[in-house]
Image: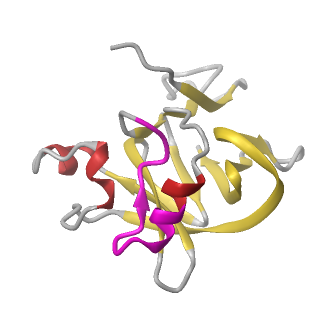
Amino acid sequence: MREPRAGTRLIYFHKTVDEAKPWNSSPGELAIEYGPAAWNPKSFARLEKATFPRWRMGMNHWTNLDAKFDFRIGGERFAKGYYYVLLERAKSGVWKLCLLDPGTVAKPELDAWHANRRGLPAYKSVPVKHEAVAEVAPKLAINFKLTNKANHRQAELEIRYGPHRLTVPVEAVF
């Protein structure tokens, strides 16, 4: 089956004087790949009212984050590696970005479709800023944006879906 996928990435290039590092021009990237789901107000309304309000952030396969170096999201440190990404709305109304270890998801044979079910393995989550915006995004759009020209390791992750805009600070750690 052919399905559309979209992606965003933060890739870094610079010279290092540390010859012990395996790289001399790039420590790597943070990359997110996702299915660009079309905005559907009815299904999003169901998500906001769900008992387990989690969303796989896209369509079909898991939204995933591939990190070639350690990083921080929302101030929380994560080790380099591969993660599945979810969005969750806590009972308090706070939206959170959740990162799951794919190995713990494979053990109970969970598909991305199961994101809103009970029994997900333990995962880390960080709060994200949510705001309603006038311009409706017709499809899910996820982007990294540099936020500090003086420190290129600081960025923001922006998630746009319908009239929703979610943001969280991201920092490369290398």
Q: Which residue reaches farthest bottom?
A: 92
Residue 102 left/right relative to 2:
left
Residue 159 screen position, x and y as percent: 65, 49
Residue 56 counted in the magenta span: yes
The residue positioned 61% from the left and 65% from the top of the image is 74
Furthest residue in direction right, as rendered: 149
- Bounds of the magenta segment: 45-59
> Any magenta on residue 20?
no
**How far across and how far down the image is residue 73, in percent?**
58, 58
Residue 17 vs residue 174: left or right? right
Decide if residue 27 is in sight here: no
In the rendered image, which quarter is residue 17 located in?
A: top right
Which quarter of the figure has residue 12?
top right
| Closest to the observer, 59 or 156 | 59
Residue 42 visible in rendering: yes
Q: Position of residue 45 (x, y in %)?
A: 53, 64
Residue furthest top in the image: 2
Q: Is residue 129 above or below residue 99?
A: below
Q: Is residue 36 left or right of residue 166?
A: left
Q: Is residue 18 above or below residue 173?
A: above
**Horizontal and vertical percent position of residue 123:** 33, 63
Residue at horizontal 69 percent and vertical 68 percent from the top? 129
- Which quarter of the image is occupied by the N terminus? top left
Q: Which residue extends farthest front?
A: 42
Q: Split into 4 quadrants, where in the image is the C terminus?
A: top right
In-front residue for pair 30/57 = 57
Residue positioned 10% across, 47% down in the render: 107
Q: Relative to 53, is 148 above or below?
A: above
